[in-house]
Amino acid sequence: MKAAVIVFPGSNCDTDCFHALRDTVKVAVEYVWHKERNLPKVDLVVIPGGFSYGDYLRTGAIARFSPVMESVTKHAGEGRAVIGICNGFQILLEAGLLPGAMLRNKTLEFICRHTWIRTEENLTIFTGKIEVGETLCIPIAHGEGNYYCDEETLKALHDNSQVVFRYASREGKLGDRFNPNGSLDHIAGIVNKKKNVLGMMPHPERASEELLGSSDGSKIWNSILSALG
């Protein structure tokens, strides 16, 4: 398996993702600058967190037009794996690779802390090594992580088993007090219909080693490695 981490001006989690993949999961990985029009031959594309283009206009709104996104869109359209984390999730929404939009957090404040997310689906590239209902301790760090979509889209997400992660208690209980940003239906991560593109607000790369306070994020990376070899 080989992975590429896309780097935009303002990315600040690219090195974290690179480290998690190379040093924790032990896979070949390389950086790809946003102005590149062609991706190297890779199995996985990672769009990392940060503040691409300073989050001007809307989060991800400018990055969506970066030259590299043409190749990322083609890569996804061919059924190959893409994961967008935090700002990467926002970019995937702006690019139309995932449905919905991001709003400001319900508190209108930037939130940076560990959260618990419940695994809703494991028939995906990204969750094959995780049990349905299993909770993961993974941190968030965002000001616009309040996922929103209309009722028709939400129904389609559930009908097609596209909701992968939801904010919950450590025991897996759902409730507003466990939802840090007001996200609709407590959604923390979704996939596209083909289930080869994942967007999630929590940062698995920041929870890939016990030294960081949790290694639960490594379950996502290992699921990808198991699926893609």
Image (cartoon, rainbow, N blue to C red):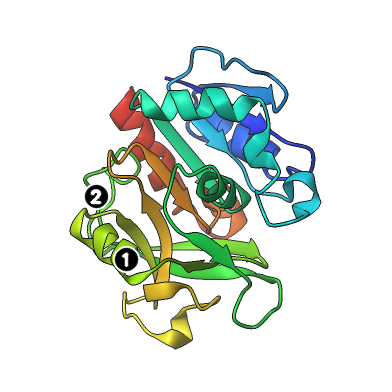
* Residue denoted by label 1: 154
Image quadrant in which the N terminus is located: top left
Question: In terms of depth relative to the viewer, which is nearer, 147 or 4?
Answer: 147
Image quadrant in which the C terminus is located: top left
Which of the two discs, 1 and 2, sits closer to the camera?
A: 1
Query: At 33% across and 62% down in the image, what residue appears?
Result: 153
Relative image position of residue 176 (x, y in whole percent) = 43, 86
Asked which quadrant contains residue 34, the reply is top right
Mark 1 lies on a secondary structure that is helix
Query: At 47% across and 68% down in the image, what residue appears?
Result: 148
Query: At 69% across and 36% down in the image, what residue appears?
Result: 15
Query: Count the marks: how many?
Result: 2
Question: In terms of depth relative to the viewer, which is nearer, 184 or 165?
Answer: 184
Q: Is residue 177 left or right of residue 36?
A: left
Q: Is residue 226 left or right of residue 56?
A: left
Name the amino acid type tagged 2. Answer: Asn
* Residue denoted by label 2: 122
Q: Can you say whether 107 is above or below 94 in the image? A: below
Relative image position of residue 193 (x, y in whole percent) = 28, 44
